[in-house]
Amino acid sequence: MTRISSKKYKNRKQLLQQTEQISKLLRKIITILLILLLCSQALLQFNTVRHWVTGVDEWEGTHLN
């Protein structure tokens, strides 16, 4: 376990506040990414969107060799 330099954080309260802010930011980022993932997966259920986003459906059933 590493120790945090006392020069950077003057006291434990300040360190806890900083980590809480970072945790909140990370939670927001993860929530946004999960929402974007769900939306993108929902959009890929439509043929027009799937055809526009990826070209894999055109190759389905054809030999690549």
Image (cartoon, helix red, strand yellow):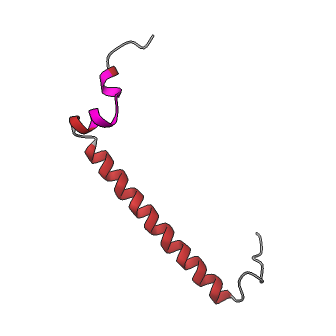
Q: Is residue 21 left or right of residue 46?
A: right
Q: Residue 39, image x and y in percent? A: 30, 52
Residue 2 coordinates in the image, percent (x, y) = 77, 70
Q: Quadrant of the N terminus?
A: bottom right
Locate residue 36: give its quadrant: bottom left
Report the residue at 61% width, 83% height from top. 16
Vertical order, 7 against 53 (above or below): below
For the point 42% across and 14% down, which residue is it? Answer: 64
Q: Is residue 19 left or right of residue 25?
A: right
| Residue at horizontal 53 percent and vertical 78 percent from the top | 21
- Residue most toward the top? 65
* Coordinates of residue 20 in the picture (x, y in percent): 55, 79
Q: Main secondary structure of the magenta part?
A: helix
- Quadrant where the image shows the C terminus: top left
**Rendered residue at 50%/67% (across/down):** 26
What are the residue bounds of the magenta stretch? 50-58
Vertical arrangement, residue 53 with respect to residue 11, above or below: above
Vertical side of 10 occupied by 35: above or below: above
65 drawn magenta: no
64 relative to 49 in the view: left or right = right
Number of labels in the image equals 0
